[in-house]
Amino acid sequence: MLKGINDKKKEEIIQTASIVAGCLIYAIGLNMLITPLALYNGGFMGIAQLIRTFMVSVLHIRIPQGMDIAGAIYYVMNVPLFYMGWRIMGKAFFMKSLFGTTVISIFLVLVPVPGTPIIEDYLTACIIGGIIAGFGSGLILRGRGSAGGPDIIGVCCLKKRINLSVGQVNILLNMVVYGICLFMFNIEIVVYSLIYATVFALTVDKIHIQNINTSVMIFTKKLGISKAIMEQTGRGVTTWDGEGAYTHMRSYILFVMISKYEVNQIKQIVHSIDPDAFMILTEGSAVVGNFEKRL
């Protein structure tokens, strides 16, 4: 019992560290590589940046040099989404989303925006900035939290079995943001912002492994693996009796569908019972029917 408590506490610490690190990495990618080139993020952050531009350029509100208030605007915009996260994903996700959004908003205000771009080439900055910011956002999601905005919407869609990933929700919201940008800025700014947003969304989906379905086939000669998987993961297991074509020895074939996030846990369960078990793992499997998303 004590070991179980310690393992749970350790997992919570790792998840919290993942969220904080992801927030910092995201803020660095956005503030230090994208914002100095006057490019725009997609989704809620893009809307926050547009509001900031309006406040500075039209309302002439003075902001300290090197500081970006888009993070504070972004936080206020997320307040209604916190309620949605609470209702659909539960209290734990709500608390981590609140924590993640708070931390990322603080970092977005504190991480300085360089007066001159670190990378002056737009295409290079878009690719590198998209990878860095997307990696940070993906880390937040892997910590079972969110940075607000499209993250909350995307995870809730997956929970409700709406066929939209977090990255795809980002792309849809980007269409709205960049449609507005077309009327405000030149086409070059919009095109490069789109490149950044696309790289960002693709990176998020690669890092956010909870939304990657993985089918697992296990070949073993020992009993007890299916029971251990069901008890420790809550996943259903389908079994067949098999026979080696060469040895004619009896074996057991198990099939289970999981998220990529659970792969290491499945491997540990199987190898603890049968170190010689043969496993086939297939990522990106499409699932139709009653499959529980673990988000």
Image (cartoon, grey):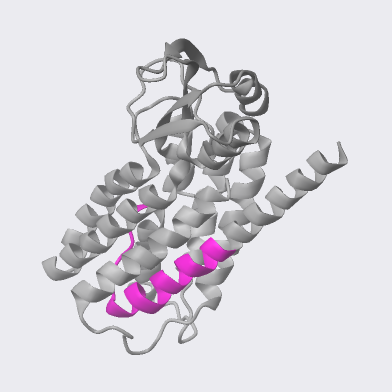
Image location of residue 275, percent across then percent down: 58, 36
- 277 sits left or right of 228 in the view: left
Residue 179 part of the magenta-drawn span: no
Q: Position of residue 291 (x, y in %)?
A: 46, 21
Q: Quadrant of the N terminus?
A: top right
Q: Is residue 275 above or below residue 199?
A: above
Residue nearest the viewer, comparing 262 with 160: 262
Residue occupying the point 57% across, 43% down: 82
Residue under the image location 67 percent in, 37 percent down: 91
Res 268 seen here: yes
Q: Residue furthest front?
A: 247
Viewer-nearest residue: 141 or 256: 256
- Position of 180 relative to 229 (above/below): below
Residue 36 belongs to the span the image colors magenta: yes
**Residue 42 in which image quadrant:** bottom left
Residue 282 x/y as whole percent = 36, 34
Magenta range: 21-43
Nearest the eye: 47 or 58? 47
| Magenta stretch, overall SS | helix
Left or right, 172 with respect to 189, comes to: right
Residue 199 location, quadrant:
bottom left
Above/below status of 57 relative to 88: below
**Coordinates of residue 78 in the picture (x, y in percent):** 52, 50
Most distant residue in the left direction:
187
Identify whether 5 is placed above or below 115: above
Judged from this view, the residue extending furthest toward the bottom is 116
Residue at x-position 49% and y-position 65%: 71
Q: Quadrant of residue 110?
A: bottom right
Residue 147 seen anywhere in this rendered image of the structure: no
